[in-house]
Amino acid sequence: MKKTVYLITAFLVAPCTLAQTIATPIDLRGGLAFSVVDTNKVEKEGLGYSIGAGYHVNKNVRFQLSYADYGSLGGENLGVKFTHLDINGVLPLSDYASIYIGGGGSYSANDTDLTANIGLDYTIDKNWSVDVSYRGIFDAGVSQQDLYAFNTMIVYRFTEEVADTEPRVELRPIEQKSPVVTPPIVEKSSLEKVVEPNRPLVSHETQCESGITQYRLKDGEYLNLIARRHDISLNELININVCPAGILTSCIQEKKFSFH
């Protein structure tokens, strides 16, 4: 009997072209910035905006260029505008969330300052995400005061479709023959029944008629005489069980006797 099994075999045939959507390295972002200027006398607060773009070198490194006008939308007019250039190290926490920390420099009114920032990215879908961050600008502007800003940004990341060539997976039937069972070799037992040459073999189909004959030994009788009288050999008579009762059991057809 033959059995047919199916093995999954991958091999290159005519290429199967699939469209795959991947994210590009570039994103655009924009949102609100709530800022605080810490002076020696008083703290000034303002609400402004920030716009920018990002470039993802890989999943762990990102460059970011942005422009922020702090205090132009509400609160006190802080009168500070900055162009920021940052490099951030990104640590993915899951498929949807990641944290980042980084630093860089800011330019404002012919003055450059150092910056540091930390934030959280949360992905909504393949294009949209939310960026919440906290930025510090040290010795900002001509007043040489520290500025701290809490930013909430909406980020759009560009995607593109690329052709993805994958090997076609097909099922190839393979016939599998049933294994041939070899019958075991039976060896002759070393302990075989020894048949005396003078004792005829008896067929299993032969019916043996048995009877009990009373026989009393007389003086002067010998085994040879008894064997000849009953037409059996001396060896057969010796092999017969003899007991003192002197009862002889005979199988007429097989010429077998025993004393009981």
Image (tube, rainbow, N blue to C red):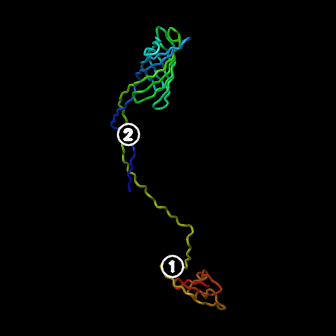
Of all residues, the one furthest to the left in this rendering is: 14
Identify the residue at image location x=49%, y=82%.
207
Q: Position of residue 19 (x, y in %)?
A: 35, 32
Q: Name the residue nearer the viewer: 26 or 177.
A: 26
Which of pointers 1 and 2 lies earlier in the amino acid sequence? 2
Q: Quadrant of residue 57?
A: top left
Q: 158 above or below 85?
A: below
Would you name the residue on which mark 2 appears? 11
Secondary structure category for the residue under label 2: loop
Apparent side of residue 200 relative to residue 124 in the rendered image (left or right): right
Identify the residue at image location x=48%, y=32%.
94
Q: 186 above or below 247?
A: above
Q: Amino acid at mark 2?
A: Phe
Image mark for residue 202 = 1
Q: Nearer the viewer, mark 1 or mark 2?
A: 2
* Spatial separation of the CA atoms under disc 1 and disc 2: 73 Å
Q: Quadrant of residue 128?
A: top left
Circle 1 residues within 10 Å: few <14, some 14–19, many ≥20 = few
Q: Position of residue 201 (x, y in %)?
A: 52, 78
Q: Position of residue 155 (x, y in %)?
A: 41, 24
Secondary structure category for the residue under label 1: loop
The quadrant in which the N terminus is found is bottom left
Q: 91 above or below 226?
A: above
